[in-house]
Image (cartoon, rainbow, N blue to C red):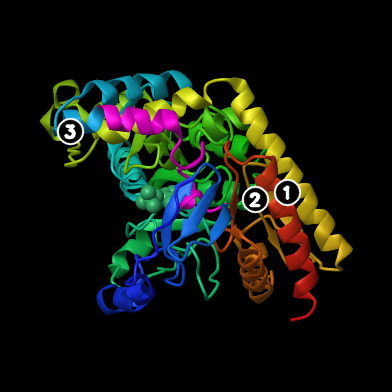
């Protein structure tokens, strides 16, 4: 392994970041760690510290950092041009592969970020229905658009279905265009839909909301009720796409929406996301098919970028054998089991929430089935646990273990040791 170069400027980098970046960071992770390099399931910071990485770039690096096949695909394309604003071979092949893999996708459009993908998914649905309102679930994350930032993480809890904006700067009117329901509450969803279906353009949901699995039958009810009123159902699969199964959460849970958004894994670590779905809905992007009046413009300078598409295609190729998912699920299951055992052994009341490719520990006595359940967990203890993991060579985000195909036995052993040490040390705080 090559050594990390420790430049004399490195110690100043955090200070320099604070001078030029609001908050000293890019808006994602806090500024205290500067990542210099990643390989397989590990990353190194600019001081040369090595970590087992469960952040995975917030999920895209599902096959591990710098996978040789992804690197080769990228390096083959780069000298041949990096963007064209026109069709390219890799982008068309990637579109074909995704259409074949994901049940609801008959046609697809590429964009550069998940926020864009969900924005277009909601717009297609509203245009099709010729109604403005969107139903989303409290605590569901769909990126940073005005609609998506309704009741993502409300600090004051309102009565359903009132939407609460999560950011200043969003026009007040948008709150009136979003209807909010609690995740996993089938009866409440039915009541809200019966009352508001006339005004609804779309229902958007993370089929696995953040880390909360859907209750048995919940997604089926969303499907039945939206079909009953011909309201497009959007699955936001930015996280779950190609992660829970090759066909995403819609394959994993056997419920097919009308539209879905994809991101993260399909770009292989490059900026690429997509909206896809039923052909009659996607045809709204085709002026020749629907005419001027119904045509929905969709343009993005880097959409379908050839380097990102090449990386995405190479990533999907690695994931094609069923054994890839078996491996990830096996690794995740071991870690979830070890987390649970460590919590019990060291006397912490905790819930291990999620599925093997994506999970975390919440310090609470209560079962968690929605956003309000998450709020009851002890976040201070969660942060302290994450800090202790980091000082034991395990790197993760605030609220997720993302498992990769590249995490090997050594990574698991280091992580299990770190989990046990962190669980023990938590009692000393
Ligand atoms: C479910 C979901 N939707 C949308 C987004 C936004 O994607 P991006 O960060 O690429 O804009 C994310 C990002 O984490 C996400 O998890």
Q: Position of residue 250 (x, y in %)?
A: 55, 31
Q: Position of residue 246 (x, y in %)?
A: 53, 27
Residue 189 vertical placement versus 228 (above, below): below
Q: Position of residue 327 (x, y in %)?
A: 66, 31
- Report the front residue among 249 and 187: 249
Describe residue 213's horizontal placement relative to residue 60 as left or right.
right
Image quadrant in which the C terminus is located: bottom right
Residue at disc 3, secondary structure: loop
User: Would the CB of label 2 be found within 8 Å of ligand 1?
Assistant: no
Visible in this render: residue 47?
yes
Disc 2 to disc 3, C-alpha distance: 41 Å
Residue behind mark 3: 295
Residue behind mark 2: 359
Residue behind mark 1: 413
Q: Quadrant of residue 94?
A: top left
Q: Residue at x 70, y 63 (%)?
A: 362
Query: Can you tell which of label 2 and label 3 is closer to the viewer?
Result: 2
């Amino acid at each position: 392994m090559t050594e990390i170069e420790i430049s004399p400027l490195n110690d100043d980098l955090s200070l320099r970041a604070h001078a030029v970046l609001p908050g000293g960071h890019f808006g994602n992770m806090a500024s205290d760690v500067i990542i210099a390099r990643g390989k397989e399931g590990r990353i190194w910071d600019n001081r040369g510290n090595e970590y087992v990485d469960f952040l995975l770039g917030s999920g895209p690096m599902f096959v591990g950092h710098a996978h040789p096949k992804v690197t080769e695909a990228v390096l083959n394309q780069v000298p041949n041009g990096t963007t064209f604003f026109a069709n390219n071979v890799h982008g068309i092949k990637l579109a074909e592969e995704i259409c074949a893999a994901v049940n609801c996708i008959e046609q697809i459009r590429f964009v550069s970020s998940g926020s864009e993908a969900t924005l277009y998914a909601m717009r297609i649905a509203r245009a099709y229905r010729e109604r403005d309102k969107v139903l989303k679930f409290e605590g569901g994350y769909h990126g940073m658009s005005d609609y998506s930032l309704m009741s993502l993480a409300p600090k004051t809890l309102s009565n359903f279905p009132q939407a609460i904006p999560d950011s200043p700067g969003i026009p007040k009117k948008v709150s009136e265009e979003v209807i909010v329901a609690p995740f996993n509450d089938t009866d409440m969803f039915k009541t809200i839909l019966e009352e508001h279906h006339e005004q609804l353009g779309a229902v958007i949901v993370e089929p696995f909301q953040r880390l909360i699995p859907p209750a048995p039958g919940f997604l089926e009810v969303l499907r039945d009720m939206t079909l009953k009123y011909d309201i497009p159902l959007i699955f936001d699969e930015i996280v779950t796409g190609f992660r829970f199964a090759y066909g995403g959460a819609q394959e994993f849970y056997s419920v097919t929406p009308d539209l879905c958004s994809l991101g993260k894994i399909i770009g292989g670590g490059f900026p690429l996301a997509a909206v896809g779905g039923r052909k009659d809905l996607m045809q709204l992007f085709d002026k020749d098919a629907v005419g001027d009046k119904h045509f929905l413009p969709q343009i993005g300078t880097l959409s379908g970028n050839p380097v990102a598409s090449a990386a995405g295609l190479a990533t999907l190729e690695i994931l094609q054998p069923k054994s890839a998912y078996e491996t990830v699920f096996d690794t995740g299951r071991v870690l979830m089991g070890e987390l649970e055992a460590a919590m019990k052994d060291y006397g912490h009341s905790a819930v291990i929430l999620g599925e093997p490719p994506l999970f975390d520990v919440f310090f609470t006595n209560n079962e968690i089935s929605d956003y309000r359940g998450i709020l009851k967990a002890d976040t201070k203890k969660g942060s302290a646990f994450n800090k202790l993991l980091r000082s034991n060579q395990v790197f993760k985000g605030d609220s997720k273990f993302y498992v990769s195909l590249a995490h090997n036995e050594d990574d698991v052993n280091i992580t299990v040791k770190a989990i046990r040490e962190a669980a023990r040390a938590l009692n000393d705080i």
